[in-house]
Amino acid sequence: MVDDDRVEVERGDFSYQHLPFDRFLDDAAGLGREEVELWGVAPHFHVPQVSDAEARAVRRRVASRGLRVRCLTPEQVMYPVNIASPDTRLRASSIAMFRRAAELCAELGAELLLLTPGRGYENEPPEAGWRRSADALGEIAAHAAALGVTCVLEPLQRVESNVLNDSRALARMLDEVAAPNLAAVLDTVGMAVAGESVDDYFDVLGDRVRHVHLIDGRPAGHLAWGEGELPLAEYLAAFSRRGYDGFMTFELFGDGTYAFAPRPVVERCLSAVRAASGRAGG
């Protein structure tokens, strides 16, 4: 059985991007959550502009609701952030952003910093982008380790990255970087788009899976549960069978309308998890 207390509220600032940050925190506490994954993006937490003192103030605001930031996920797909870029200036600034994000994790008391692999040019050998990504991940992980922060790496869909798209490539990258504080993210949408299963991830990664994005899709879309076609009960049963006891996050993008009234969307997802946990035998 997957305990719904292990389900975090989604990357807070996405669905709540048109509402004050305190509204997100109030809703998370009101829904009985204990930990949150914080989306590092404007207007709530723009990593390049947040000072140490501001991060500590956010930590106090979070704690005042009985919450804790478990994971910081800087925006790194829509923003000009690309650790595998052939452009040396863009790549250097991207690495610097993640190094700064690791420092902010420490100020927030967040255990995890979420990373993605970036992308190379489409007309260059794939190994070139891979090499730049691996070198950057090693540098970022080393900086994070000195701060007591664990990094977790998420594969992206092929439209988002030409470096790393599935569990096998993720395992290869973790092995190559060989940083003890670099682990894996399982995103159910990215997993489904790649034609993989929960068991596929655990077969190749085992206990290196440290964080899960639990969302519906068709198979893409990052939808609220019940709006897509993915088998929630099957996923939850597999997580239980494989002994996963970490947290899961609703990473809700949809078509943008979730931001109009985000709390009911999260409530539907929590209800779906409770119902599916029962069907999964919990």
Image (cartoon, rainbow, N blue to C red):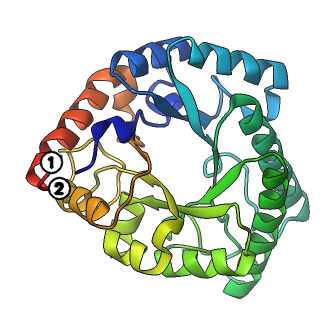
Left or right side of 115 for 35: left
Q: Which one is in front, 73 or 193? A: 73
Whether the residues at callouts 2 and 1 have beta carbons within 8 Å, the answer is: yes
Question: Which of the numbered marks, if any, corresponds to residue 276?
Answer: 1
Q: What percent of the width, then of the height, locates residue 173?
A: 65, 77
Q: Name which residue type carries label 2.
A: Ala
Separation of marks 2 and 1 at Cα, in angstroms: 5 Å
Callout 1 crowding tier (Cα within 10 Å): few <14, some 14–19, many ≥20 = many
Residue 145 against residue 64 in the figure, above or below: below
Find disc 2 in the rendering and name its residue.
Answer: 233
What is the secondary structure assignment of the residue under circle 2?
A: helix
Q: Which one is in front, 14 or 101? A: 101
Q: Name which residue type carries label 1.
A: Ala
Residue 276 against residue 52 in the figure, above or below: below
Left or right side of 74 for 136: right
Confirm whether residue 159 shows in the render.
Answer: no
Question: Which of the numbered marks, if any, corresponds to residue 44?
Answer: none
